[in-house]
Image (tube, rainbow, N blue to C red):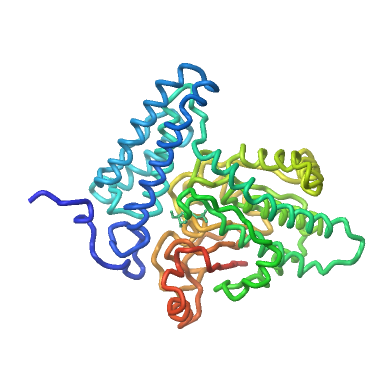
Amino acid sequence: MAKASVSDDCIDMVTPWNEYLSAKYKRSFAYHTVRNRLPVTVTQVIDHLSRSKEALVQTYGEGSREEIKQIIGYLSKLKNEMQTNKPLISLEANEVDASDWNNFLNTTEERLGRPLLWFADVWLHIECYLYRRIRESFALTKHLNQYDPFRHQKEEAFTGSLQAISVVGSYLLKLIESDAKIDTEQCVLQFLKLSLWGNRCDLSISGGKDISQVENPLDMISTLDELILVNDLQKVWSALNSTSSGPKIIDIIFDNSGYELFSDLCLAHLLVKLGLANKIRFHGKRVPWFISDVMEHDFHWLIQEMANQTRAPCLSKLSTMWKDFLSSGTWTYLTESFWTLPYSYDAMKQIDPELYNSFEGSKLLIFKGDLNYRKLVGDVFWPHTEKFSVALRGFEPAPLVTLRTIKADVVVGLQPGQAEKVAQKDTDWLVTGKYAVVSCLVK
Ligand SMILES: O=P(O)(O)OC[C@H]1O[C@](O)(CO)[C@@H](O)[C@@H]1O
C-alpha cells in the first residue's frame, strides 16, 4: 500500500535516551523542526526573493532576473525533497567545502547501507545540510553567487536592538574609562552573562520573526540567575584569571549577529582591557547559516553601523576602538569551513586537524549558542544528568565553555531531579531559550 504521508516513515515516540536526536521520532523537537520549521525557513527565502526581485535586478543586473527564477525553482524543489523524505543529494557547485560535504554524505551512506533521509537521520546533519543547500542555490549562479538571503533580517535585528545596544555600550565605556578601581571578577561575570543571554536573540528559533533585544539588558540579567541550570561561571572566571606564561589568546566561536554579536564584542573588549587576554580570535561562518549566524560581512557591518549612530556617541567611540583592535591584530576575524560542515566537534581532530591544533595554546574557547552546544555534545539525547565531560567525547583542545540558552532538547550536567522540577514548571523548557547553561571544561 502507498504511504499516506511522510509521517508514516516516523515512529510515534519520544527520543530514546542515548540515541541521536532525529526527526524519525515523531514526539521530538527534531520532528517538529524538520516537519514545520525548516519548510517555513525555505518559504521565507522564496518570498523574500519574489518580493525583492526588481530591487535585486537593479543591483545585480538584468542577468540576475533568470537566476532569481532558477533559485526559486531550486528552493521549491528542495522543500519538496524534504517534505517527501527524499534522499539527500550531493552538492555540485564548485565551493571549497563541497568535497568535504560530499565525502560526509558518501561515507555516511556507505555506513548506513542506504542514502541519508530527512526524516530518518541525525537532526544535526539534516539541519546543517538544509542551510548548506540553501547556500548551494546561490552558489550555482553567477550574479547572485555571493548573495546572503538572510542579511536583511540580521540588519533589522541589529537596528531593532539599538536601544539595548546603547545601554550596554555606554555602560561598557563608562567602565573602561573610569579611573575608579573596578571589581574585575564581578565585571567579567556580568559581561559573560550579557553574552549568554544575548543568545536568546536568535532568528532561527523565532522563524525569522523580529527578535530584537528591547528590555534593558543590565536590569534583565540580574534577575535571570535562577534560569541558568548549569552555572560554571566561577570556573570560567578561574580559567580567565589563570596566570601562565605565553600569549593570552581567547577564542570566541560566534553564533548570532545583531545584539548577541554586540554583547560578545563587549565581552571581548573587557577581557582585553582588563589584561585577561592580549589576543582574541573570532570565528564566524563561511556561508549564510541558521538564518542569523555571523558572517564576515555582518561582523564588519555591525562595527561600521555603530560608527553611524550619531545619537549614541558611545557606540561610535566603541566602533573606533574596535577598528583599532582589528588593525593592531589584537582582534582577528577568522572563517574556517569546519563550522559549516555537519560534523560534531569530536570529529574536528580528524577532519580538520589544523583547526584543532590551532586551539592548543588558547586560554579559553568560548562557544556561543545552541547549535555549538549541539555540536559539542554530538546531538545525542543524553540523560540530563550525564557529565558534560563525557558528552564531549574527547573534544578537549583547550579549556572551553559554552554560553547557551536552551533551544533544542539536549542538555547535560544537571543534578538528579533538576530536569523534572523544571519540566513541572515549564513543559517546553528545552526549546524556548528561557533557560540557559554555562558548562565549562578545564583540563
Ligand atoms: O542560534 P542558536 O542558539 O545556535 O540556535 C539555533 C537554533 O536552531 C536549532 O538548531 C533548531 O532549528 C535550535 O537548536 C535553535 O533553535
Residue 125 position in % (x across, y down): 39, 50
Residue at 79% over, 55% down: 170
- Label count reads 0
Residue at 54% over, 47% down: 293
Q: Hey, which residue is sitting farthest bottom in the picture?
A: 417
Residue 265 position in % (x across, y down): 70, 51
Residue 162 horizontal side relative to residue 28, left or right: right
Residue 170 horizontal side relative to residue 4, left or right: right
Residue 108 horizontal side relative to residue 171, left or right: left
Q: Nearer the viewer, residue 359 or 93?
A: 93
Q: Nearer the viewer, residue 442 or 283?
A: 283
Residue 166 position in % (x across, y down): 74, 52
Q: Hey, which residue is sitting farthest left in the picture?
A: 1
Q: Hey, which residue is sitting farthest right in the picture?
A: 179
Residue at 46% over, 81% down: 421
Residue 191 position in % (x across, y down): 71, 62
Q: In which quarter of the image is the C terminus?
A: bottom right
The quadrant in which residue 196 appears is bottom right
Q: Nearer the viewer, residue 380 or 397?
A: 380
User: Taking 399 as reference, is 413 above or below it?
Assistant: below
